[in-house]
Structure formats: structure tokens, C-alpha cells
Amino acid sequence: MVYFDAASGEPLDPAGREAYLAALDEGWAGPDRLYREGRRARMLLDAAREATAEVLGCRADELVFTGSGTAAVHHGVLGLAKGRARAGRRLVLSAVEHSSVIHAGELAAARNGGELELAPVDVHGRVRLDLLTELLAQPGPVGFLAVQSANHEVGTRQPLTEVAALAAEYEVPLLVDAAVSLGREPVPSGWSVLAGSARKWGGPTGVGVLAVRKGSRFAADWPQDERERGWAPGPPNVPAILAAATALRARSAESQEAGLNHRELTTLLRARIPELVPDVEVVGDPDDRVPHILTFSCLYASGEALLLELDRAGFSVSSGSSCTASTLTPSHVLEAMGVLSQGNIRVSLPWDARGEDVERFLDALPDAVRAARPEPELGRESTPEPEPEPGESADASVVIDALGKLCPLPVIELGKRIGGVPVGGVLRVLADDPAARLDIPAWCRMTGQDFLGTEPLRGAPDSALAYLVRRLR
């Protein structure tokens, strides 16, 4: 089995594994105890903190270890919001932040009587600096700004240098979720709070890092104890923390060489996939991106079916499609970008990715997509629509009732019927699947048809819309 889901978590780095096994004997005791075993554990914990702080570019006393990357993000968001509640209650996040950031932001806004505002992004998933500036300049002070280092679904890097300059100009602290890039790329500057997850850089699951710059207004909004400055309650897992720090140092030292290899392989994927598979949209910035992530969407394909077909072929990948088993709504990242969501696959290369495995993936992909597409010849040999009745306008629209049908069925129906409509004719697709908001306009863009917009359906829920499509060719 070839593992291509490193953005979810990496196998444990060999150096980290050695450190973990050694620390099981030396670091099992509570590091807050004064007896010998406790002092040994404290020495290991302090060494791990120093090593991690060196990579992050912060002081050791600005860094705490949490029980996960999610916990680090939650504490970072809640702590900044609580500490800055008097300074500003508007919380500004990029629209493509990890769901853990957005969920914590929603909770923080509710607890502090504030408002959560999402900064729009462009089609590549990069925050739009012009619109972010407008948000920061609006009336009402801002509590904090959160912008990730790079996107976890499509790999696009965020313009953090410019974002940090804006944050400084408006005197707003910047929170950076650096989970995607820690251990792979240089740590960005200009942040007030930074969070990361050890499992993303080859450390063990169950370790997160939270760094808070001195001088930042930060207050715990959760039950505290005497450990980790009260910012990470509960006893620290010293062996896992030492393994995480060791893996981070090892990966950071090798990151340039690994990054070159990953970029070469993802560039190959980006070039070859559209050649091998018709009706594919590769998403994310083609150049300014982390080197190990490549994401694409396949028109007419079920994301769940495609995942299973690739699994049968021996490849572990992930998906942001709405038609996977875990969700019935489109990925909020793909939605914010306005790109195709159906048949979505993210390939994220592990540290030791090999060219032969990528070539095998390319060999297997066309058959997997064909199996996940129920209609291989959509739109090519459609039955002509019936002639209009006497007295009926010749350009009256054709109605496709896809209400109650989930991704990718509304677009499949559209693809089947478009060929039977005269050039210039209009189809009205009635759909209540949230994914249709993305997939029907994306289908028009990819197939050269004209998306005219939407109309509400009288007496129907807000999610039910009529999507108007004009055939151009």
C-alpha cells in the first residue's frame, strides 16, 4: 500500500522513534516532581522545548506543548480572544483556515460577545489582501487576525509577509496555524501566536505546539492547572514530546532536499493528470505552494467511489468532496475558492516519497476515475429535446429536476441533457444539494457553457435553487 496522505499525518520519523523508545525508560515520571525520576523527565522536557523553540524562532519560555495540534489551535484562538476581549471583539480569519480554527473562532466570538468575519480568497485559495485590508479598516476594533502558513487542502502558500505587515499597521495580533509547513519550510515571521501538530512533521500523534510571543495579551479560557504555564492542562507526555522535538529537528535539517524531491513529483502529477484523465481541474496555486500537496477534482465522479477505487489499487489518499461518506456539504476550502468539488482527491507526499510510486499512481488513476464515473460519455450523444409546442417560445428553457439528488448526480444529469439542447438554448437545473453551488458553475467553466446564475424556487427551502445554463457549443 502506498501512503499519499501525509498532510493528515506522517509515519513516525526514525530519529523520533529512537528518542521515544529511549525516553520510555528515562522520562516516564512527572516532570514536576522533585525526586530523581522527576528531575530526569524535567531535563528531557526542557531539552525538547529548547530544540523546538530553536526551530520555531522563539524563546523556550514562549512555548508550551499541548495534547494535539487541534488543542494548540483551540487554545491559541480562545486565549487570544479572551486576552484581547477589551481591545477588540471582531475576529478576522481567512475563509480557508482549518476547521479547527474556524470552530474555535465561532466559540470565542460567542463567549466574548464578538463577531467572526471571514476574509475572502482568490481562486487559488490565497487570501485577498485588498479585501483583508478593507475588513481590518472597517469600524470596530479587531481582536486578532488568523491566517495559516499554507492551505491544508490545496497547498497554496499564504502571503504572510504582507499579512504580518497589515496586522502590524492595524495593531492587531496575528495567529498562524503552521501545521502544514512546520518541518518542511522556514517558519514565518511576524506572528504573535503560532500553532502546529507533531503528527504532520513525522512526530507522534498526541503532541501539539503552541507559541505565544512575550507581550501578547493572552488569557486561558479553560480550566487551568500548574503545568505548562496553565495553557495546556494535564501531565505532559514526555517521551512523545521528546520524539516530536527530535523529529522536527531532523526534518528541518533535511527539508530543502526533501522539498526539491516533492516539488519535482507534484509538478509531474500536475502536468500528467490532465493528460491522462478528461474533465479534470487541478486546484491550488501551480507555483507558490508547499511542495508536497497536489489536489485535483474530477467532473462527474463520486469522491467516495474514487477514494475506494484508488484504495483497491493500493493508494491511500484523501478527499474534500461533498460526496464522501463523512459529509454531505462541500469542503469549505473548495467552496471559498469557487472551484469544482466533486471527485476531489488530495495527494500529499510522505517524506520518503518515491518516483516509482507516483508513476504507479498515474498508471492506476485513469481506470479508477472511469470506475467512479457512472456515465463515461456525458453530453456527447444526448437525445435531442422535444420541439416546443405550438405557441411556445423556441428559446423556452428545458427543466432538469435534480431535487433530492446528491453530488455528483445533478451535474451528471446536466451533462446527459446538454447535447440535446440547441445552441443558445437554456437549461434550468433544479437542485438542493449544497455542492451544486460550486459544481454547476465549475462544469460550465470546464465545458465552455454559459452559467447565467440562479433563481429561488417559490415555496422551497433556501438550499433549493434553479441553476440557469445556456448552451454555447
Image (cartoon, rainbow, N blue to C red):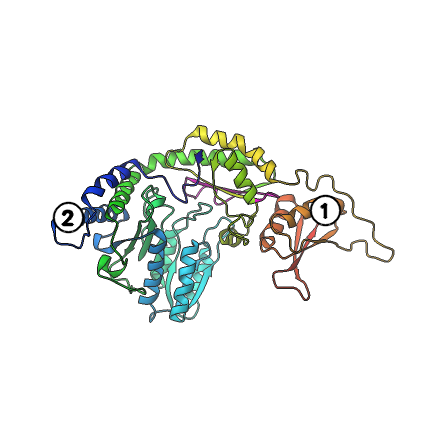
| Residue 304 x/y as whole percent | 54, 44
Q: Quadrant of residue 373?
A: top right
| Residue 287, picture quadrant | top left
Res. 206 visible in picture: yes
Comparing labels 2 and 1, the label whose residue is closer to the camera: 2
Image-based side of 28 in relation to 379, left or right: left
Amino acid type shown at disc 1: Arg
User: For the residue labelled by badge 1, is the local secondary structure a helix, a strand or a loop?
Assistant: helix
Could you say which is closer to the camera, residue 81 or residue 221?
Answer: 221
Distance between the alpha carbons at the discs numbered 2 and 1: 73 Å
Residue ID for mark 2: 37
Front-most of 75 and 167?
A: 75
- Amino acid carrying label 2: it is Glu
- The image position of residue 83, as x and y in percent, is 31, 66
**Residue 295: x %, y % from top left:** 49, 42
Q: Are marks 2 and 1 in contact (CB under 8 Å)?
A: no
Q: Residue at x 36, y 69 (%)?
A: 88
Q: Is residue 297 magenta?
A: yes
Please provide the residue range marked out in magenta.
282-302
Q: Residue furthest right?
A: 390
Horizontal side, residue 58 vs residue 103: left or right: left
Q: 462 left or right of 348?
A: right
Which labelled disc corresponds to residue 437? Answer: none
Q: Vertically, is 432 above or below 459?
A: above
| Residue occupying the point 52% across, 35% down | 312
Q: Is the magenta stretch mostly helix, strand or loop?
A: loop
**Earlier along the polypeptide chain: callout 2 or callout 1?**
2
Q: Which mark is residue 417?
A: 1
Does 240 appear above or below 176?
above
Q: Is mark 2 on a helix, strand or loop?
A: helix
Relative image position of residue 2 (x, y in whole percent)? 44, 34
